[in-house]
Image: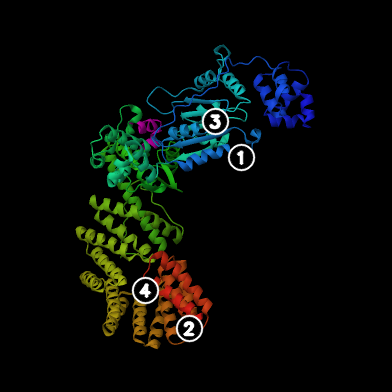
């Protein structure tokens, strides 16, 4: 050994690193303190010395007798799965394991943990890949089913798994120790210097796997499990491969491979229905394909209808044995959950959307946030739910069906109803909090819902940007929660939900959803018999329809709102209705009517002591004068509106009035003053997260800069405006786009 090491100019430390042995062992061998090292160790040293022929045989001959009784190369892989389709990306990820530096010592033991939910095809993928690359492993392939999840027997203990692996390696039974640690040490010794592929299938957890890992480089280990095996990733350097359901094309290909491409081509719509009903889960698709293949005369439309019309799709997705019963396969994962995680999984079925935020789940469960976070980590680790976006969780439709069946079986009707009420109240009070963050002075005659189910756990928000982001993410959940509230007879709750979303919808220029929400609100208010809520909703619908240009319907709703406000003697409400009737009249070029309506709004706001309402009326009268060409009169009204808004602390109202003052200066040929006003308006709108009016102010700024001959500044303002309007799908986008095109053409 000393002679070979010195021949290569290596130190003892360098030899130990290259061979994957300890420096202490090298020192003992060179000092003659070990008469006959093990053959597996000698192979490592021969590789490190790059010995061949007689020199290699001479070194290997100094070893003790091998513990392996035979020289049979293990080839234990199950058969290559027929009908395999798709998974090209995942196969490529596994192929990448074999790439990299050729020096095995530099790479260490290569481990990949293939994880995913029940029935997603983890074992199938691993076996397919193992067959593709088995010629890369001249010393063979080992396979063991660890039974971590399944109907047959308990999980295989690591000691028992090691005995089977050692048997496969040809170790004689009398050489296998009884002690787990000694058995694992022997296993690592036998593997040393060999290049094997080891497939550890259906592992229960990292602790079951760890004793089965090689100790030195040369082998590749593939582990499949429903558990994410995070411990292997953190402590053992495993590379995680998370397997999802098939994409739609691969799901169709799976059916075509099993029942024939012609049959699939003849009924494409039925195939699409089957793929959707099976949630693109390979196991479910395989069960449906087996049923179709066994009944070649059945039209696929009949099979699709059977799945679609069943009380539970899981009743249909059953195979001839426990391993092909989707409900049974799911149950193996569910049974391992702790009480909190099991209950939270069942409650997933009660939520109104497939993807839900952690805070909403806290309200749904009625548990402390810390307990819910712990339960979510357990569910994610078990691959029963996935974190689809940071803090947002979901699962595919078949798992939701399974959760719903469990909830109906285990949880009482009363408990399910209580969870649903907590969810509704969570969304209502979170929406109210988010709206308050966007517009702190918004109120409704000092009315605000205060009752809330215990444990609803609404969220709070520190700034407008977070509030806008929450509203954007939760629109589907809010709509569905409102529908649930209506179905449960909670009409006032549904009304307040519709009220709470309006600031967000206005700032996104989403008048169509605004109108939809307020039609829900009108119906809810009428059922509740609440005149004020009816008036507010008719006003809100009229406001939105005016913005959309549907002036006849806008006038009808605003007139109804005015009558209801009069019935209540609500001067502020009457002022708002007159103000918007004035806007409708101005857009219809009925300027005298518009000024008259504005005058009514101004007088009623003053009577009510509503300074903001008074400022809004002044601004609208000023804008009407702008439309009529009376720019000095317009400037006077709009400046007074600015002062009133600012005195009342109403930043948004002040921004609208600054935009109006800017327009008056622009029309008077005073571009410098106009540009200053527009910049101030755009800055406030940006700070208040009102994208629509920020873009409008920027568009006006571009007009002013262009008129002043500052073409580059004009172009920058229009581009910024266009980016926002395009994102909002705003009708003004085409006008701004035309300004950019005309300005560029003129400068050519």
Q: Where residue 131 appears, x then y in whole percent?
A: 49, 31
In the rendered image, which residue does mark 4 sit on?
612
What secondary structure is found at the residue carrying circle 4? Answer: helix
Disc 1 secondary structure class? loop
331 magenta-colored: yes
| Residue 459, above or below 106 | below
Which residue shows up at 36% across the image and 70% down it?
A: 731
The span from disc 1 to disc 4 (Cα, nearest Å) is 69 Å
Q: Earlier in the sequence, mark 2 or mark 1?
A: 1
The numbered mark, 1 or 3, whose residue comes first in the sequence reads 1
Mark closest to the chain's N terminus, 1 or 4:
1
The magenta region covers 328-343
Sequence order check, earlier mark of 2 and 3:
3
Where is residue 661, by image quadrant? bottom left
Identify the residue at horizontal 42%, vertical 85% (top origin): 667
Whether residue 451 is situated above or below residue 64 in the rendered picture: below
User: How far, Cα to Cα, is label 2 from label 1?
Assistant: 63 Å
| Secondary element at tag 3 | helix
Q: Residue tagged by mark 1?
A: 100
Dot 3 surroundings within 10 Å: few (below 14), some, or many (20 or more)? few
Query: What residue did someone put label 2 on?
Result: 707
Local SS, label 2: helix
Identify the mark nearer the N-term, 4 or 2. 4
């Amino acid at each position: 050994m000393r002679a070979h090491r010195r021949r290569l100019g290596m130190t003892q430390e360098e030899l130990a690193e290259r061979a994957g042995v300890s420096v202490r062992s090298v020192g003992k061998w060179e000092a003659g303190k070990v008469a006959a090292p093990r053959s597996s160790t000698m192979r490592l040293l021969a590789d490190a010395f790059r010995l061949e022929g007689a020199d290699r045989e001479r070194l290997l001959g100094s070893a003790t007798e091998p513990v392996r009784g035979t020289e049979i190369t293990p080839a234990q892989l199950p058969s290559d799965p027929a009908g395999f389709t798709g998974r090209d990306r995942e196969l490529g990820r596994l192929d990448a394991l074999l790439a990299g530096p050729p020096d095995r010592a530099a790479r260490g033991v290569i481990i990949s943990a293939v994880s995913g939910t029940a029935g997603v095809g983890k074992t199938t993928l691993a076996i397919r890949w193992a067959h593709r690359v088995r010629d890369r492993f001249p010393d063979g392939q080992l396979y063991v089913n660890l039974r971590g999840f399944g109907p047959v027997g308990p999980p295989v203990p690591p000691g028992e798994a090691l005995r089977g692996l050692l048997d496969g390696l040809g170790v004689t039974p009398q050489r296998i120790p009884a002690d787990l640690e000694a058995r694992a040490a022997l296993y690592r010794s036998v593997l040393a210097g060999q290049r094997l592929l080891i497939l550890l299938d259906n592992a229960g957890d990292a602790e079951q796997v760890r004793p089965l890992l090689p100790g030195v480089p040369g082998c590749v280990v593939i582990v499949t499990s429903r558990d994410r095996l995070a411990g292997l990733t953190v402590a053992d350097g495993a590379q995680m491969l998370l397997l999802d359901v098939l994409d739609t094309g691969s799901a169709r290909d799976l059916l075509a491979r099993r029942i024939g491409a012609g049959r699939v081509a003849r009924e494409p719509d039925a195939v699409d229905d089957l793929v959707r009903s099976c949630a693109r889960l390979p196991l479910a698709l395989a069960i449906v394909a087996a049923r179709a293949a066994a009944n070649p005369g059945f039209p696929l439309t009949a099979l699709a209808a059977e799945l679609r019309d069943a009380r539970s799709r899981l009743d249909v997705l059953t195979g001839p044995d426990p391993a092909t019963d989707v409900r049974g396969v799911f149950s193996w994962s569910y049974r391992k959950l702790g009480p909190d995680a099991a209950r939270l999984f069942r409650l997933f079925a009660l939520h109104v959307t497939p993807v839900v935020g952690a805070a909403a789940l806290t309200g749904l469960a009625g548990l402390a946030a810390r307990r819910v976070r712990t339960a979510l980590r357990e569910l994610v680790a078990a691959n029963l739910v996935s974190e689809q976006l940071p803090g947002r969780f979901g699962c595919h439709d078949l798992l939701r069906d399974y959760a719903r069946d469990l909830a109906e079986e285990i949880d009482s009707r009363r408990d399910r109803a209580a969870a649903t009420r907590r969810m509704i109240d969570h969304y209502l009070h979170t929406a109210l909090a988010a709206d308050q963050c966007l517009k702190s002075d918004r109120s409704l005659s000092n009315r605000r819902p205060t009752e809330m189910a215990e444990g609803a756990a609404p969220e709070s928000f520190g700034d407008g940007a977070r509030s806008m982001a929450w509203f954007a993410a939760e629109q589907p959940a809010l709509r569905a929660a409102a529908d649930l509230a209506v179905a449960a007879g909670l009409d006032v709750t549904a009304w307040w939900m519709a009220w709470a979303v309006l600031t967000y919808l206005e700032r996104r220029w989403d008048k169509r959803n605004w109108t939809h929400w307020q039609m829900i609100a009108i119906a809810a208010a009428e059922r509740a018999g609440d005149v004020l809520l009816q008036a507010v909703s008719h006003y809100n619908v009229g406001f939105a329809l005016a913005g959309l240009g549907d002036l006849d319907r806008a006038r009808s709703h605003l007139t109804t709102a005015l009558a209801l406000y009069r019935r209540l003697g609500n001067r502020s409400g009457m002022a708002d209705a007159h103000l918007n009737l004035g806007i409708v009249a101005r857009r219809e070029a009925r300027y005298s009517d518009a000024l008259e309506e504005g005058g009514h709004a101004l007088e009623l706001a003053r009577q009510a002591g509503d300074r903001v309402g008074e400022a809004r009326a002044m601004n609208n009268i000023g804008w009407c004068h702008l439309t009529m060409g009376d720019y000095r009169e317009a400037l006077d009204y709009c400046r007074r509106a600015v002062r009133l808004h600012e005195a009342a602390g109403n930043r948004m109202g002040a921004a609208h009035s600054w935009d109006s003052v800017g327009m008056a200066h622009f029309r008077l040929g005073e571009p410098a003053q106009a540009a200053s006003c527009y910049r101030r308006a755009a800055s406030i709108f940006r700070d208040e997260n009102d994208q629509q009016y920020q873009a409008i102010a920027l568009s006006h700024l571009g007009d002013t800069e262009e008129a002043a001959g500052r073409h580059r500044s004009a172009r920058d303002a229009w581009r910024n405006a266009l980016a926002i309007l395009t994102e909002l799908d705003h009708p003004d986008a085409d006008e701004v786009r035309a300004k950019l095109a005309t300005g560029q053409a003129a400068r050519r």
